[in-house]
Structure formats: structure tokens, C-alpha cells
Amino acid sequence: MKKRSIYVIIFMAALFLAQPGSFAQAPVNPVSKDTVNTASKAPVNPVSKDAWILNAGFGAAAHYWGNGYGFGPGGKLAFEKGMWKVGPGVFTLGAEIGLSFFWHKWGVNNYNLKERWGNLMLGARSAYHVGFDVPGLDIYGGIPLGIGFSRYTHSGYTGIESWNEWHGYTHHPVFLYVGVFFGASYYFTHSIGINAEFGYNINFAQVGMVFRLN
């Protein structure tokens, strides 16, 4: 009797296990590409139509109304919006703001001459962005156009007119600027990446961060 009961229990268990959906089927290769959280993956062609992009960088500033001498650091903040899908890429429109500083020392005829510039620059920018269908990659080139405000001081020589006549330089406190830039970004996630840009803009070259806001 006891043996028959055991047979009945085994038979009933076999019937239960044989029913489809009795247990959820375990995944094959559970840690696979398809199980990665897509929200954290780098986007393909990150600058798309209607995308909002913000980048901030720091680097070597460009001379505009300086004399071309001396080194100056510069920082720039720019944002762009994807406007038109053209071919494999997207044209953007946006704006930029930057600060740059320069200084230079001269040792001429026993004079210790010093020059200093501080520039605030505001402008519009447009660029063409393409990602070549590589996840996270954005390559672009564009043109800025804006206005700059410059403050210039010097020491070690008396008389601003004599300084300018000897130096061959006239300072312009307000000026227009136009240039060209090329850059590349790589997004680690949907929204955050690194950026590098070079050309003749507020900065000759800069590195920084880029953020996709939507």
C-alpha cells in the first residue's frame, strides 16, 4: 500500500512538471548583449534633429585683437539644437560664450614691458554633425560669428600714444569675430561624453565635456 502511494505521488509530480509554463524558463547566456540596460548605452548618431547639446571646454585661447604674442588660457560654453537632417548628418544652430586672457613680457632697451588682455566673446554658431552610425561618436565642423569685448593694459612704458607708435599696435575694445572649428565627441552614456575641439574660434584648441539634454 505504501509503495503504491509513492508511485502515485511520483506520477502526479511528473504530470505537474510536464505542464507548459509550470516554471519560468531560465535564459540562455543570461549576461548577454540583449540584457544590457539600454538606457545607459551610448547613442548612435547622438546629434539628431531636435537634439539639444551643451558642451564646455578649456584650452589655449585664440588671438584676435592682440599682437599675436604670448600664451592665454580660454574657456568656452556652447549649446546647439539639431535643426535640419541633411544627408547622413544634421545641421545645428546655437550660441557660445567664452573668456580668454593673455599676457606677454618684453625686454627691450632696458625696459621691462608687460601687456595684458582680457576678452569676453559672445556669438552664434552653426555646425554639421555626423556619427557614421558608430555608437557614441559625433564628428562635426562649423562656423562661429559674434562680437568680442576686450580690455587691454600695459606697464613699463609711459605714454599710450608712444607705446602704440613704437609697438605698431592699436587696441580695439569692441570687435567682430568669425572663424571655423572642427570637433569630435564620444558619449559614454545616452547623455554624457567627452569633447575635443580645435580651429580658429574663441580657443585654438580645447577639451571638455558634452551633454545631451534630451
Image (spheres, helix red, strand yellow):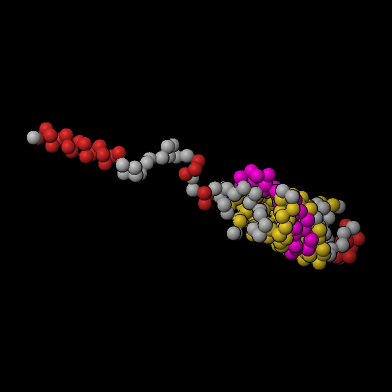
Q: Nearer the viewer, residue 76 or 44?
A: 44
Q: Magenta-highlighted stretch: main secondary structure?
A: strand
Residue at 43% across / 36% down in the picture? Answer: 29
User: Along the horizontal axis of the image, is 137 left or right of 4?
Assistant: right
Which span is picked out in magenta? 121-146
Residue at 82% across / 63% down in the picture? Answer: 176
**Where 132 sits versus 213, above or below?**
above
**Where 152 sits versus 30, above or below?**
below
Quadrant assignment for the C terminus: bottom right
In reply to whether residue 122 is colored magenta, the answer given is yes
The answer to which quarter of the image holds residue 103 is: bottom right
**Most distant residue in the right direction:** 165
Residue 210 rendering spot, x and y as whole percentages: 62, 54
Q: Nearer the viewer, residue 120 or 19?
A: 19
Quadrant assignment for the N terminus: top left
Residue 161 visible? The answer is yes
The answer to which quarter of the image holds residue 177 is: bottom right
